[in-house]
Image: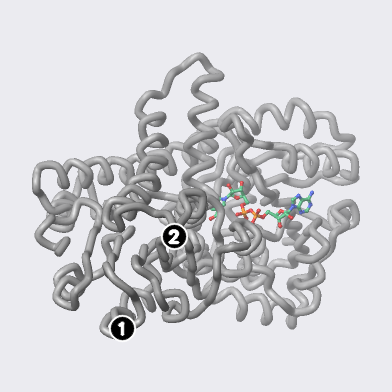
Amino acid sequence: MKIVVVGMGYVGLVAACCLARSGHQVIGVESAPEKLSKLRSGILPLYEEGLEEVYRKTVESQHLSFTDDLREAIEVADIIMIAVGTPSLPDGRVDLSQVYEVSGTICEAADHPFIVVMKSTVPPGTGKYLIERFFSKARVPISYVSNPEFLREGIAVWDWYHPDRIVVGCDDARTAEKVLELYSDIEAPKVTMDITSAEMVKYASNAFLATKISFINEIANLCELVGADIKAVAPAVGMDKRIGPHFLQAGLGYGGSCFPKDTKGLDFVSTFNGYSFNLLKAVIEVNAKQRILAVRKLHKLLGGLVGRRIAVLGLAFKPNTDDIREAPAIDIIRYLVDEGAEVAAADPLAIRNAASQLPPCVKLSPDPYEVLHGAQAVLLATEWPQFIVLDWGKVKGLMREPFVIVDGRNALDPEKLTELGFIYCGFGVLPKFRG
Ligand SMILES: NC(=O)c1ccc[n+]([C@@H]2O[C@H](COP(=O)([O-])OP(=O)(O)OC[C@H]3O[C@@H](n4cnc5c(N)ncnc54)[C@H](O)[C@@H]3O)[C@@H](O)[C@H]2O)c1
């Protein structure tokens, strides 16, 4: 099929590359000049494991090309996939301006029937609204399908080929079948439903996962008060098949481009519809509090923050990505700097993205040992594997008293670090490990 994918971000670029690898003829449309020129000159504008190879091969075989001219790209399209950003507005509402702009252009330029597939995460009800406002008004028939994306950054290419399910929301069975043909080489349950339900599946899934994270963080906070150890509690809770082991890691909470904006977006949709989603409001509040908790732990263990030297390990919102959107580390570093601390931070991939988001006084380096030099405390904010296996004896030699470690991901070995002479502090980890 001839497919146009609009928006070459984490979702659109992965979709474009993988669809091209499946043999489709794909045009990727990107409006940001810098990104487009990179894509055209053989450089990936973002990091995703395994994407480089798919990108090179599909460009070489001429299955994939890039443009900023959506109108021209549409001329040959069977399917137009929208994968533009849907960020949060300050009041929590979802900013749909990119979706509206693309939808408007598609309608104006449409000169033959095709299918519009919405990959961007849009609030329940958006599809119906887009049909009413744009697609039903085009000169030619345009079918609309909601096809939410569940891939995880860092392993997005793997997820593309191994999804837990493929959801297609559409009012017409033949159109749904045609869209499912895109995934004919992927073995996964394929579920069809109406458009608004498909949109809700995406929000409900992310809200539920965020709930698990905030829930286990509340339990960890309670563990600290009653003297229980979350590192023993959480895995045992997760062994219950009805609960499952995933998203039960206590610590700094969720970040990234999806959970924060999707939870806030669903909360807004609820309020807009006259419903108070109290559970979701608590999930959002707990998540915000975990970041402040990290600052409080550092404050307490260092006896204040003014002039204290703190190394932050990890800037990306999770390992294996360069994405720093809503990353806990960014908020925490800003708090620490505001409170007078001197902060240096390391990350293997996210330095470039983080630099523009942080005060210039924050020293950044890809080398953890460099930022640990002279630090009195270290905060592990992202559990990059290379940080877990640092030579902690060497780290101790580089740091200064009182040798504090705040383990924001409960990923380090408390006993080993305590033995080395560190003051270890996790989230909900038993006090005996705190030195
Ligand atoms: N990132 C994820 O892990 C993930 C997972 C599932 C779903 N989603 C959803 O997918 C959507 C895209 O997410 P993302 O992380 O890829 O976003 P992104 O911000 O990384 O990428 C969006 C891209 O669209 C481009 N763009 C905006 N307007 C355009 C236009 N008019 N024409 C052409 N290009 C345009 C932007 O320049 C940008 O490169 C969002 O709705 C998001 O919620 C994201």
Mark 1 crowd level (few <14, some 14–19, many ≥20, 10 Å Cα)? few
Q: Which mark identifies residue 327?
A: none
Q: Name the residue at the top extreme.
A: 274
Nearer the observer, disc 2 or disc 1?
Answer: 2
**In this rendering, does residue 166 appear at all?**
no
172 or 167: nearer the eye? Answer: 167
Amino acid, disc 1:
Gly
Residue 286 visible at all: yes
Q: Earlier in the sequence, mark 2 or mark 1?
A: 2
Q: Mark 2 highlights which residue? A: 307
Q: Residues within 10 Å of mark 2 (few under 14, many from 20)?
A: few
| Direction from residue 190 to residue 4 in the image, left or right | right
Front residue of 80 and 230:
230
Which residue in the protein does label 1 denote? Answer: 397
Vertical comparison of 352 with 96: above or below: below
Toward the front, the furthest residue is 307
Pinpoint residue 337: horizontal percent, then vertical percent. 50, 54
Q: Amino acid at mark 2?
A: Gly
Residue 73 position (above or below residue 142) = below
Residue at 27%, 67% in the rendered image:
402
Residue name at image x 21 percent, y 47 percent: 220
Q: Secondary structure at mark 1?
A: helix
